[in-house]
Image (spheres, rainbow, N blue to C red):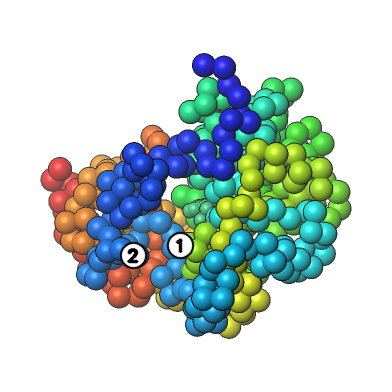
Amino acid sequence: MTYNPARRLFLGGSLAATAAGATGIITPAALAAGSSVAAPHVMYGPQAGIAKLNANENPYGPSPAALKAIAEASSTGGAYYAYQAGMYLTDMIAEEYGLKKENVAITAGSSLILAFAAYAATSKGKILGPDLFWDTTSKAPISQGGPDIVRVPNTADLDIDLDALYNAIDDNIAMVHICNPNNPTGKVLDTKKLQDFCIKASKKTLVLVDEAYNELISDGPAHSMIPLINQGHNIIVARTFSKIYGLAGMRVGYMLGSEENISFINQYGLGGYSINQAGLAAAIASFKDEAFKDFSRDKVMEAKDMIMTAVKANGLTALPSATNFVFVNLGDNGDANAFRAAMEKENVLIRGQYRTYKPWSRVSTGKIEDVKMYVDAMPKALEAMYKA
Ligand SMILES: Cc1ncc(COP(=O)(O)O)c(C=O)c1O
């Protein structure tokens, strides 16, 4: 099949397939059947008694202000296209970062604009990334005959190896994709090193930094690469309302970049048409809600402390996490898939194995009572894993 990224308007194939049934309609059954975020669902969330710790959501959202805005926007605006609210949020975001509205693209979740960026990049060349990162969107073009990601090994500490990435940039590379903090490791890069890398690498190719978890770092703004866009470097940054804002189900995300990069990427999808009134209302009400962000950060810290204490008590180790999830090393005989299966028997949903990283298991923070279920189930699940 000839590869034609322009055919993939709206949703990348693999993204759609993750959540949609044969009809293309996202049903709870399709969600439960198809993907790594599968969970026994009632219509709008996990069943009571199920600790859903597998998709890095913030179950303390939406905030009270967002809930009020959702109700209001749905009743007065549900019948209408969401143009004004879309423009309002775009302006809010542009103003926050000292950019113009032409530097901002908002879509239904950041996955969509990230997938558009992947299609745009692969119309010119290949995407370069680490071995271990959130690669879903940069893999999306592959189903259309696009190129596979060129990968560079992580360091022994599972950090992103910026020097190796830089050395791997050649004329075939159209974009470098970095997540900071990274998923699934939870690690954050040294800001100065990442800045230096971005400035150097962006002279050779487009650099994408996905900052989905930035707001979870206590000094998030200090870690952001957005100022490099203001300085004119060839860098795009993605952000989402799905994590700290607790709006994963409301589907709002955005990308920032030069006017030229944003309009090039927007050619690969009609992103503005993907956004909805209720999601926008929630995002607008949440964007500057510092009290809710502080509250969420505190809950994440509390949950991470519980996870880290349990990890230690069970003789295991975990990577330091700047995010709302922890990458746990289950040890030499560890098996993340067996551990996930054993946890599921205890009604705790976590992630299984990533690529070749068999002993590494990712658990999200969630409601404190759900994290307690994980902690309580850990000895039993480890025993079952060793027996498997
Ligand atoms: C690094 C990263 N970027 C983007 C996303 C997707 O977020 P959204 O809900 O905005 O599509 C995720 C989801 O887990 C993620 O981990």
- Classify residue 309 as left or right of residue 224: left
What residue is pinned by disc 1? 249
**Relative vertical location of residue 79 with respect to residue 232 in this rendering, above or below:** below
Direction right: furthest residue: 231
**Relative vertical location of residue 369 with respect to residue 236 in this rendering, above or below:** below
Distance from the alpha carbon under mark 1 to that under mark 2: 9 Å
Say few, some or many: other residues with alpha carbon within 10 Å of mark 1 (under 14 / 14 to 19 / 20 or more): some
Q: Depth check: 80 or 366 in front?
A: 80
**Residue 114 falls in image quadrant:** top right
Q: Contact (CB < 8 A) between labels 1 and 2?
A: yes
Circle 1 sits in a helix, a strand or a loop, which is it?
helix
Query: What is the quadrant of the C terminus in the image?
Result: top left
**Residue located 21% across and 49% down the image:** 341
What residue is pinned by disc 2? 45
- Classify residue 268 as left or right of residue 146: right
**Residue located 53% across and 68% down the image:** 78
Circle 2 sits in a helix, a strand or a loop, which is it?
loop
Q: Depth check: 194 or 250 in front?
A: 250
Number of marks in the image?
Answer: 2
